[in-house]
Image: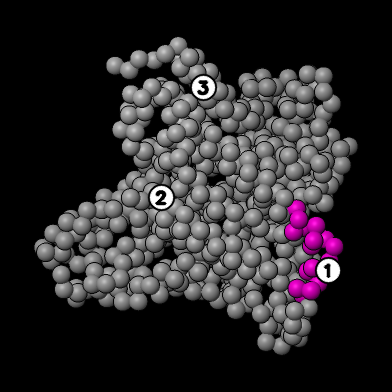
């Protein structure tokens, strides 16, 4: 039994209070916007809303969804995220499996060359304009594939998965090979099922990245065919020209509706985050820290 | 074990990733020659006029770009400094929380902002920081202070950018330190306790020294990011009022390139940034390897 001294007890209490304050600082802005989105605009205008809705109603949500471009944008975002997640997991995991074998007898010839190829791709690229020109030249402009393909291989995710694969006990695959399994079977029936923590982690990263990504949507898609985050960018981020204009914008653009728009954009993240949160700490730690 | 006969399957599994990278990362690199041309869209890369280093010369003479480079460095360095301190400090403190439930709850909340996009957070901050009726300014007024135009005042914009970045990332960034702390041998603490070391002494003589390799890695790798001041964040928070202090290389490349259509100049600026970043990251990686034995592959 550890003896805890009085000053230590004081420190613990003090520390707990600081931690609670930090946690509050992180979610209070969100709570405020939720409260605004659920309050009547009269209460919002009178600056009465802090962290609890006043005159609770869902008017701003129905109003936001009535905007004819809103639902198609959500649908495009859903498709794009699903495509990126599915293809991304397959492509990155397959490559990670191969690279986790290393060179030498178990792996592939030219291992170092492939590693170099990915490392260079992680560190250097053609930059905004050349990439933009390529994507439009090969006919992807205004196609969902322009949002999916260019970022499909993420070398950070690849490394995370690869390190997890490397840590799996070698005996498992060796016994499978003895029983006559081939690489594809070992990969799909043994490595993938054993790697759920890292797949959940990387999957969460992929969903978050793709759902939140707005820039590619703004340069590769036509104005009426954009994912939700790109649409939100144009709806929410009104350029502020000067202080007096701010008031104009606040009056024109109902604050409750804007808050509702912001929250609809954040909703999928808020929903999946708590479910996957418990996986990712373990997933990152295993992928990032090596013995 | 003999080389397996089905290793061709390995190549097959690698092909999709290699193709994506070749097409979408390596092919655009060819377009970098634009930086040495006076690129005209209707003439294409093959027929546009070669101008050598003209675009780069322009980059260093153009008053705006000097200001932009300086803004980038300043914002990135401030973020690096405060980000590092807040992340490390938070990791040390949360590690001292004994109640598991409290610890998990706090972590859940402080990690959350990392997963929200700057578009969403931009919307939240515009609401929160509004000088007229934003909650923050109402609170300041209640305390008898003047309202502050956080997003529209050149002097406050820097503060807003750095503090919102710290706010978004301090929790999430602490994961790497927490992992390293979890890896410290508990016997060290037991020995220190037997020698009569208090909590403070233990942190000073065991936890912090054990974290030095991780700190070196985090610091050197983030040093290589000094030309990345955060396009996503700046782009979602800034406006013409704060171009003077808020415009960074990436936003500048976007405005000059895609908005003004000056492809060659914008590519040259981007190339300059990429090359400097590449040199920095390779140096940082080598340093991290030497000092902390850090290796990716």
Label 2: chain letter: A
Residue to which mark 3 is pinned: A15
Marked residue nearer the N-terminal end (3 or 2): 3
Quarter assignment of residue A219: bottom right
Mark-to-mark CA distance, 2 and 1:
43 Å
CB of mark 1 within 8 Å of CB of mark 3? no
Residue at the location (79% across, 49% down)? B245
Find numbered disc 3 in the image and state the secondary structure of the residue it sits on.
helix
Residue at the location (32% across, 47% down)? A196
Q: Position of residue A128 (x, y in %)?
A: 65, 66
Residue extending farthest to the bottom is B47
Q: Magenta part mainly helix, strand or loop?
A: helix
Quarter of the figure with the C terminus of chain B: bottom left
Q: Which mark is residue A288?
A: 2
Q: Is residue B96 left or right of residue A143?
A: left
- Mark 1 and mark 3, same subunit? no
Q: Position of residue B64 (x, y in %)?
A: 83, 61
Residue at the location (58% across, 65% down)? B278
Q: Position of residue B229 (x, y in %)?
A: 66, 52
Quarter assignment of residue A37: top right
Mark-to-mark CA distance, 1 and 3:
52 Å
Residue to which mark 1 is pinned: B61
Query: Mark 3: few, some, or many residues within 10 Å (few <14, many ≥20)?
Result: some
């Amino acid at each position: 039994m550890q003896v805890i001294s009085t000053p230590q007890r004081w420190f613990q209490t003090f520390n707990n209070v600081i931690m609670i304050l930090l946690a509050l600082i992180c979610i209070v802005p969100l709570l405020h916007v939720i409260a605004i989105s659920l309050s009547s605009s009269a209460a919002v205008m009178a600056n009465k809303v802090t962290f609890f809705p006043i005159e609770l109603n869902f008017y701003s949500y129905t109003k936001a969804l009535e905007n004819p471009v809103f639902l198609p944008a959500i649908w495009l975002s859903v498709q794009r995220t699903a495509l990126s997640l599915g293809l991304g997991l397959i492509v990155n995991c397959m490559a990670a499996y191969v690279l986790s074998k290393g060179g030498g007898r178990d792996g592939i010839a030219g291992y170092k060359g492939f590693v170099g190829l990915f490392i260079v791709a992680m560190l250097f690229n053609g930059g905004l304009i050349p990439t933009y020109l390529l994507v439009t030249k090969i006919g992807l402009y205004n196609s969902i594939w322009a949002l999916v393909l260019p970022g499909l291989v993420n070398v950070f995710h690849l490394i995370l998965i690869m390190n997890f694969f490397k840590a799996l006990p070698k005996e498992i695959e060796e016994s499978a090979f003895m029983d006559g399994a081939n690489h594809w079977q070992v990969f799909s029936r043994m490595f993938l099922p054993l790697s759920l923590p890292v797949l959940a982690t990387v999957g969460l990263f992929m969903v978050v990245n793709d759902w939140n990504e707005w820039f590619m949507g703004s340069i590769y898609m036509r104005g009426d065919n954009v994912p939700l985050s790109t649409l939100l960018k144009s709806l929410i981020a009104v350029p502020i020209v000067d202080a007096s204009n701010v008031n104009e914008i606040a009056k024109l653009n109902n604050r409750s509706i804007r808050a509702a728009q912001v929250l609809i954009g954040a909703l999928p993240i808020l929903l999946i985050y708590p479910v996957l949160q418990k996986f990712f700490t373990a997933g990152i730690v295993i992928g990032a820290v090596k013995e | 074990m003999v080389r397996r006969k089905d290793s061709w399957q390995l190549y097959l599994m690698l092909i999709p990733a290699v193709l994506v990278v070749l097409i979408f990362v390596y092919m655009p690199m060819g377009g970098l020659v634009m930086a040495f041309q006076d690129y005209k869209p209707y003439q294409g890369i093959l027929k546009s006029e070669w101008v050598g280093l003209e675009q780069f010369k322009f980059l260093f003479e153009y008053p705006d770009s000097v200001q932009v480079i300086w803004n980038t460095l300043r914002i990135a360095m401030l973020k690096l400094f405060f980000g590092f301190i807040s992340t490390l400090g938070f990791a040390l403190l949360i590690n001292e929380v004994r109640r598991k439930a409290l610890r998990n709850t706090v972590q859940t909340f402080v990690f959350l902002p990392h997963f929200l996009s700057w578009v969403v957070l931009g919307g939240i901050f515009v609401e929160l920081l509004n000088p007229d009726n934003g909650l923050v300014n109402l609170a300041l007024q209640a305390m008898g202070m003047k309202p502050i135009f956080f997003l529209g005042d050149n002097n406050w914009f820097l503060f807003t950018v750095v503090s919102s970045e710290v706010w978004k990332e301090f929790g999430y960034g602490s994961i790497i330190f927490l992992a390293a702390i979890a890896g410290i041998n508990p016997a060290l603490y037991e020995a220190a306790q037997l020698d009569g070391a208090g909590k403070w002494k233990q942190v000073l003589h065991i936890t912090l020294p054990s974290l030095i390799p991780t700190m070196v890695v985090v610091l050197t790798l983030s040093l290589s990011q000094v030309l990345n001041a955060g396009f996503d964040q700046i782009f979602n928070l800034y406006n013409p009022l704060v171009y003077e202090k808020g415009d960074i290389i990436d936003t500048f490349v976007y405005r000059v390139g895609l908005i003004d259509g000056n492809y060659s100049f914008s590519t040259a600026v981007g190339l300059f940034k990429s090359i400097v970043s590449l040199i920095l990251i390779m140096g940082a990686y080598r340093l991290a390897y030497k000092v902390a034995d850090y290796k990716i592959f």
